[in-house]
Image (tube, helix red, strand yellow):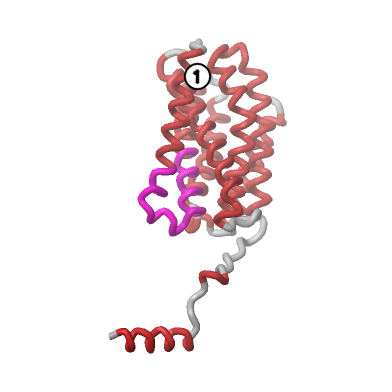
Amino acid sequence: MNILEFVPSCLLVVLLGVLIRRRALVTLPGFFAYAAFAVAADIARFLTHGNQRTYYPTYWITEAVYDLLGILVMYEVLRTVLGSLTRAWWARLIFPAVLVLGIGMSIVRANVVPSRLSGLEFYIAVGEIAVRFVQVFVFAGLVTLVPVVGLRWRQYPFGISTGFGLYATVMLLTTTKFSDFGTRFKLLWGWTSLVAYSVAVLIWIWFFSVPQKAETPNPELSAPSPGELEQYKDALRRMR
């Protein structure tokens, strides 16, 4: 194994330490679970790398779990960013709509260009492509909504989405090619994945390297002063 293959694993260990320091298990449990699983998955793959009979199922099982955790993290990001807006019925439909759109685009892509993978591996690859679409959509949506919701650049949810969004944008093409050509594309796919994922983890480390500042209330939405409350009460008395 090339020593460069351990770079993402080392970065993930650093990220996990930073997340523990920032108490992300409390504020962002989904992303913390993702980072912890990523470290455990890398260890499992390393331990089984010398045995193809154990490495092959280990790889695909961990990929399937990555897909599920990726969806969970995107839901957590949207829920955190939208905040109280999720109380509106239409806001609760945003994530399901994005998820359905991502799955639909992945299925269409699989039908247009039949994959050489088969069985469970095919469905995991299709699911991975769907997750990448969802991550790109969420990232693009947050970039669009930044002026609306007042999300600052160094807020944790935006950092998480940035890392996933950039990684997914790069990996959509390579993952699609891997699902089309199978092991013949494995070498290029592996190195592209390594570089893109390392950059994503570095982005997460950078965002979580400083404490998140508390959101400042919007002056236009600030609570009325005691004097204003008394005026409201007098107005109500006169209306009785």
Depth check, front residue: 34 or 94: 94
**Quarter of the figure with the C terminus:** bottom left
Question: Do we see residue 72 in this rendering?
Answer: yes
Residue 37 highlighted magenta (yes or no)? no
Q: Is residue 62 left or right of residue 153?
A: left
Residue farthest to the left, as pictured: 240
Q: Secondary structure at mark 1?
A: helix
Position above or below: 176 against 28: above
Count residues near mark 1 (Cα–Cα under 10 Å), then give few for <14, some for 14-19, many for 20+: some
Residue 201 % position (x, y): 64, 42
Residue 97 % position (x, y): 42, 37
Please, what is the three-letter code of the amino acid marked with disc 1?
A: Arg
Residue 75 % position (x, y): 45, 45
**Quarter of the figure with the N terminus:** top right
Position above or below: 235 against 69: below
Q: Residue at x 62, y 15 (%)?
A: 185
Q: Residue at x 47, y 85 (%)?
A: 228
Depth check, front residue: 173 or 39: 173
The span picked out in magenta is 70-94
Q: Residue at x 49, y 38 (%)?
A: 70
Helix, strand or loop: magenta stretch:
helix
Residue 71 highlighted magenta (yes or no)? yes
Q: Residue at x 45, y 18 (%)?
A: 122
Question: Do we see residue 115 in this rendering?
Answer: no
Disc 1 designates what residue?
Answer: 109
Please count the marks in the image: 1
Image quadrant in which you'd find residue 195: top right
Position above or below: 88 against 178: below
Residue 99 % position (x, y): 44, 35
Image quadrant in which you'd find residue 186: top right
